[in-house]
Amino acid sequence: MRLSSPFFHHALSTDKVMLLVIGALIPGAAIQCFYFGYGVLINLVLCALVANLSELLFLKFRGRALDALKDNSATLTGILLGLAIPPTLPFWMSIVGVSFAIIFAKQLYGGLGFNPFNPAMVGYVLLLISFPVEMTAWLPSTEIASHFPNFTESLQLIFLSETSRGLTVADFRTVADGFTMATPLDHVKTAHTMGKISSEIVTDPMYNTNLIGWNWVNYGFLFGGLLLLATKTIRWQIPFAVLASIIVTSALLNWFDAERFSTPVFHLTTGATMLGAFFIATDPVSASTTPKGRLIYGVLIGFFVVTIRTFGGYPEAMGFAVLLLNLAAPTIDHYTRPVIYGHRQGNTNV
């Protein structure tokens, strides 16, 4: 039997889409674990379990069917937040962040499909504002760490705050000459505050060595993001617009004063750039949904990422940028609605 167009295609179910996204996160997560320790893996398991438990308890409290747990959205939220937090963050902070993300940023709005904000980023920003010291206490990468925690020590740091040898997170963050290593973004911001110029900062051997780990983490998430594009799990407009905007904004600043403002390559390969562009900004519920709107949405996220990283009080900005544009997404969609075929612009009445 021949069928005439148009054809209706059956989209992937929500649970399969979530599993595809989780699978695409594996390369970046594995590299992150390699460079920054077993704490990454422990956080992923802890955050995913807490996310599902929080959703289960709240669904029971609301008297709703527990089938919502099968869509894997809670698991994805927990994993995204687990990747965004330091590998030795105290366990109770992770629980606070994940449970807040699920209960207040998702379930109180009605559950998946009704939340105006990205739940993982709500939890991340809550933790960053509430516990800025702990949330910026990333370990140095394996190449430059004087002491690097094994699996048991990672568990002890997360759940007991110190190892059986009496070592704390501060001890593991200390590298050569008693210098406490920061992330490249934090290192650059602090160095500029102290009056150093970019040509001096980039000659720091520890900075360059630690930068390698962050570079590879971003390459891993870039690879996973390209897999999502290849499988048409996400659309190209938002990640393309985010990355293009980061390049243009940082290039203009660097052209204006190369000694004060970092290069586009630095912004693209540090922090949560690729994770944010492909896995966070593309959230189908809280992001813009029109073709033109996605481009505008992504461009503004990229602009705010560079602006907040450069001039704001926090070195990482992806969470703030995404939440700001979550607020603006309905307005962007309203003014970028495509014209219905056969109607003129401004007249969409059927």
Image: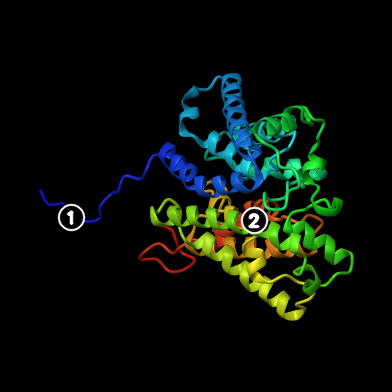
User: Residue pushed farthest left?
Assistant: 1
Of the two numbered discs 1 and 2 on the same chain, state the one appearing first in sequence: 1
Q: Nearer the viewer, residue 164 or 294?
A: 164
Q: Nearer the viewer, residue 271 or 8?
A: 271
Q: Residue at x 43, y 56 (%)?
A: 229
Say which quadrant the C terminus sits in. bottom left
Local SS, label 1: loop
Q: Is residue 212 visible?
A: yes
Quarter of image, res 213: bottom right
Q: Which residue is mark 1?
A: 4
Q: Residue at x 58, y 39 (%)?
A: 79
Kind of residue at badge 2: Trp
Kind of residue at badge 1: Ser
Q: Nearer the viewer, residue 220 or 14?
A: 220
Label ID, residue 214: 2
Classify residue 10 as left or right of residue 205. left
Local SS, label 2: helix
Q: Nearer the viewer, residue 150 or 258?
A: 150
Instruction: Estimate how packed mark 1 is, as few (under 14), some (14 to 19) or many (20 or more) residues with alpha carbons within 10 Å.
Output: few
